[in-house]
Image: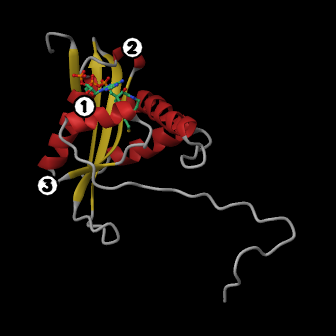
């Protein structure tokens, strides 16, 4: 155990309850940021317990938790992905989730978790690690920039407008 009582280890099945709770917080945070872009599934805790439980079985997955004095205080989740032709992105490790308990923020927990998952993905053969972060999530962007991630793509979204009442609207298309 480290001097400051923070430990990291790969997640196990017995952690799925905590993982579902933390993943649900991350999902709700995104939905609050931009409800039109980030959907909020029903039964989000249960859904993520199921999904992460399935992911735990995969050799392509790196799923780590951080504990302070034995209490789970954060997690990070990544997986190996195939070459993506549409994105011109060769095989890579995707860093999907990082979440740290509010009371533990600013103490280096995310730094330790990201480094653990990046190391695990690298050990699984990932030549690079790529992540997406919400445009308004300044703290996450500062974290990732500090850890050496550079900006490589910008996602933009436009919602379909509601059809104007009683009109086809716009130029005719075949
Ligand atoms: C973003 C988050 C993971 C950071 O966790 P953390 O354990 O507090 O991060 P660390 O203590 O390791 O911080 C490392 C660096 O990140 C940056 N950082 C972290 N929180 C920040 C904040 N609120 N404002 C500005 N920079 C911040 C800083 O550069 C910091 O280095 P410093 O302490 O030397 O200034 C945490 O705030 C969180 O869980 N947020 C909600 C979930 C989320 O946004 N996840 C990321 C997207 S998936």
- Residue 6 seen: yes
Ligand 1 contact, mark 1 (Cβ < 8 Å) = yes
Q: Quadrant of ligand 1?
A: top left
First in residue order: circle 3 vs circle 2? 2
Per the image, label 1 sits on a secondary structure element best described as helix
Tell me the element at label 3.
Answer: loop
| Disc with the residue nearer the chain's start (1 vs 2) | 2
Viewer-proximal residue among 94 and 145: 145
How far apart are the alpha carbons under marks 3 and 1?
19 Å
Residue designated by label 2:
103
Q: Residue furthest front?
A: 171
Residue 77, horizontal then vertical, whole percent: 32, 41
Label 2, secondary structure: give it: helix
Q: Which residue is mark 1?
A: 113
Residue 75 location, quadrant: top left
On the rendered structure, is 18 left or right of 40? left
Q: CA distance from mark 1 to mark 2?
A: 16 Å
The local crowd at label 3, few if under 14, some if 14 to 19, many if 20 or more residues have their Cα within 10 Å, is some
Q: Give me the residue at 57% from left, 58% from top.
A: 158
Kindly identify the residue that appears in the image at 61 percent across and 57 percent down: 159
Q: Dot 1, how many residues are within 10 Å of its Cα: few (below 14), some (14-19), or many (20+)?
A: many
Residue 114 position (above or below residue 123): above
The label on residue 9 is: none
In the image, taking residue 43 as reference, residue 114 lies left or right, namely: left
Question: Is residue 41 rendered to the left or right of residue 124?
Answer: right
| For residue 25, above or below residue 102 | below
Residue highlighted by disc 3: 125
Residue occupying the point 22% across, 44% down: 149
Dot 3 or dot 1: first in sequence order is: 1
């Amino acid at each position: 155990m480290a001097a400051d009582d923070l430990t990291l280890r790969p997640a196990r099945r017995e952690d799925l309850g905590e993982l579902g709770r933390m993943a649900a917080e991350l999902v709700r945070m995104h939905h609050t940021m931009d409800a039109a872009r980030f959907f909020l599934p029903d039964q989000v805790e249960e859904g993520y317990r199921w999904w992460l439980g399935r992911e735990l079985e995969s050799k392509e997955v790196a799923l780590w938790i951080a504990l302070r004095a034995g209490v789970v205080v954060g997690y990070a989740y990544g997986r190996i992905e195939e070459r993506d032709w549409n994105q011109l992105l060769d095989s890579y490790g995707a860093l999907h989730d990082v979440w740290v308990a509010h009371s533990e923020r600013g103490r280096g927990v995310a730094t330790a978790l990201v480094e653990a998952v990046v190391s695990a993905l690298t050990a699984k053969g990932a030549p690079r690690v790529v992540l997406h972060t919400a445009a308004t999530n300044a703290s996450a962007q500062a974290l990732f920039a500090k850890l050496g991630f550079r900006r490589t793509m910008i996602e933009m979204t436009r919602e379909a407008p509601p059809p104007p009442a009683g009109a086809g609207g716009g130029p005719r298309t075949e």
